[in-house]
Image (cartoon, grey):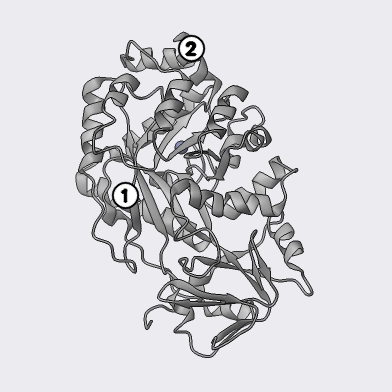
């Protein structure tokens, strides 16, 4: 069976060549692999994460206020960076690779990752785990020869978004220079994990926004752009009144905030010049939502488990969608989420938003995300010409596609990456 929010085929067959889908049909012509008890699903897209925290076993304590948590995250990062260059490098590389492996294994094909120094595209080198013959058996797979099947991509893709930070001009400039110096290596579809580079001005409370926007002609500004925005009530209070827990935190840290702070609307206006992701947007007003809905190059990333972790006000997902906003799904990092499994994120989404159908939930984690990131030519659905990022789930006896999507989007279910079933070494 092939099951996605766009089409279901029972039986369904997918042909793959050189990592791309060459045929999707309900008849099997010249295919050499069958699954008798499984459904092929599109892999999911994680539109917001910070892989550098992927070695955390559990999230960092939320604390009394949002700036409290940020303070703890910054302290953790400092501690990680407080070692020789080689050690820091190895630690960072290992954390990122751990996050990539976890994501790929659990059925994520593409990730938008916020990166901070030190970082280099070769941190993303991906070594797939050994294929699991037991999985082939588990899913009732019958294999003639594994060549065609093993040609599905053996690594995920990453859109890296260098994080720009700096309340003070000097710091901001150094951050922009660092981002500008990062380059994408020449493309090699089979090996290269880095798909493209965008940029992430971190948030309105961590950058000198007016200096940053004056720099917007700089080569460092590459799409997609992602910014944490309207995430906490503390942020809104800081931007409106220059008071509250953020003011206290800056004073404690001896940080000199810029004279002028932006409004949420000013940030939105900047983001609307590009293909941009508004990360979280937990506290956007109705008016702002309508404005975003009128700008199709803007999307909002909802991270359901992180949202619940901080105990924010109920997420206005229905209002956003009614305003015409393209909402997409992310895990955020292991600093606020128990893991990087996008299917678990999707299940939590359905729990928090029970009005949503499995098809609607699947859409925001696949085709909508591909559109938001400007990657719909390559990823997002099971169709001819797309990269074969495919996952697989076990079917129950007589299960229909609708029942399957309902079940796997509500109940804990093992969903594997198709790539995990085959040995690519001889392909
Ligand atoms: Zn984030």
Which comes sooner in the sequence, label 2 or label 1?
1
Query: Residue 93: x percent and y percent?
Result: 31, 52
Residue at the bottom extreme?
Answer: 144
202 on left or right of 142: left
| Residue 244 seen in render | no
Q: Which mark is residue 249?
A: none
Please report contact status of discs 2 and 1: CB closer than 8 Å, yes or no.
no
Residue at the right extreme?
Answer: 398
Query: Residue 420: x percent and y percent?
Result: 49, 71
| Residue 150 seen in render | yes
Pick the residue in front: 276 or 165: 276
Q: Label 1 neighbourhood size at 10 Å, few (<14), some (14-19), many (20+)? A: some
415 up-or-down from 28: above or below: above
Label 2 and label 1: CA atoms lie apart by 39 Å
Quadrant that contains the N terminus: bottom right
Residue drawn at the location 53% of the way across and 80% of the way down: 133
Query: Residue 267: x percent and y percent?
Result: 43, 25
185 on left or right of 35: left
Q: Which residue is mark 2?
A: 240
Residue drawn at the location 45% of the way across and 44% of the way down: 49
Quadrant that contains the C terminus: bottom left
Q: Which mark is residue 91?
A: 1
Pick the residue in front: 199 or 370: 370
Within 8 Å of ligand 1, the CB of disc 2? no
The mark lying in front, picked from 2 and 1, is: 2
Q: Label 2 neighbourhood size at 10 Å, few (<14), some (14-19), many (20+)? A: few
């Amino acid at each position: 069976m092939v099951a996605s929010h766009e089409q279901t085929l029972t039986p369904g067959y997918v042909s793959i060549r050189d990592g791309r889908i060459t045929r999707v049909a309900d008849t099997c012509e010249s295919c050499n692999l069958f699954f008798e008890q499984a459904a092929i699903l599109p892999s999911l897209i994680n539109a917001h994460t910070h892989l550098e925290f992927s070695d955390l076993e559990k999230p960092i304590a939320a604390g009394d206020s949002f700036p409290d948590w940020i303070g703890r995250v910054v302290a953790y990062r400092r501690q990680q960076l407080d070692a020789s260059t080689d050690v820091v490098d190895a630690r960072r590389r290992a954390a990122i690779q751990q996050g990539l492996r976890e994501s790929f294994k659990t059925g994520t094909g593409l990730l938008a990752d916020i990166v901070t120094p030190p970082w280099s595209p070769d941190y993303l080198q991906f070594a797939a785990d050994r294929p699991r013959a037991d999985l082939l058996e588990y899913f009732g797979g019958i294999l003639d020869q594994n060549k065609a099947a093993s040609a599905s991509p053996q690594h995920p893709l990453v859109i890296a978004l260098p994080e720009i930070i700096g309340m003070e001009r000097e710091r901001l400039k150094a951050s922009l220079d660092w981002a500008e110096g990062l380059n994408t290596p020449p493309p090699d579809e089979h090996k290269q994990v880095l798909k493209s580079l965008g940029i992430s001005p971190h948030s309105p409370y961590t950058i000198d926004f007016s200096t940053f926007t004056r720099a917007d002609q700089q080569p460092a500004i590459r799409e997609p752009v992602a910014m944490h925005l309207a995430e906490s009530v503390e942020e809104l209070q800081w931007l409106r009144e220059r008071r509250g827990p953020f003011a206290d935190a800056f004073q404690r840290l001896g940080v000199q905030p810029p004279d002028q702070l932006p409004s949420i609307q000013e940030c939105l206006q900047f983001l609307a010049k590009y293909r941009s992701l508004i990360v979280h947007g937990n506290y956007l007003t109705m008016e702002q939502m309508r404005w975003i809905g009128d700008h199709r190059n803007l999307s909002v990333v909802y991270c359901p488990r992180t949202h619940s972790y901080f105990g924010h006000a109920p997420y206005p997902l229905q209002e956003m969608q009614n305003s015409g906003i393209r909402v997409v799904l992310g895990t955020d990092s292991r600093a606020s989420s128990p893991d990087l499994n996008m299917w678990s994120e999707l299940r939590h989404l359905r729990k928090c938003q029970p009005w949503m159908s499995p098809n609607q939930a699947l859409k925001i984690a696949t085709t909508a995300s591909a559109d938001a990131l400007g990657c719909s030519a390559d990823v997002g659905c099971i169709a001819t010409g797309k990269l074969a990022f495919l996952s697989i789930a076990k079917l129950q006896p007589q299960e229909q596609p609708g029942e399957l999507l309902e079940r796997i989007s509500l109940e804990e279910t093992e969903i594997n990456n198709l790539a995990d079933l085959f040995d690519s070494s001889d392909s």
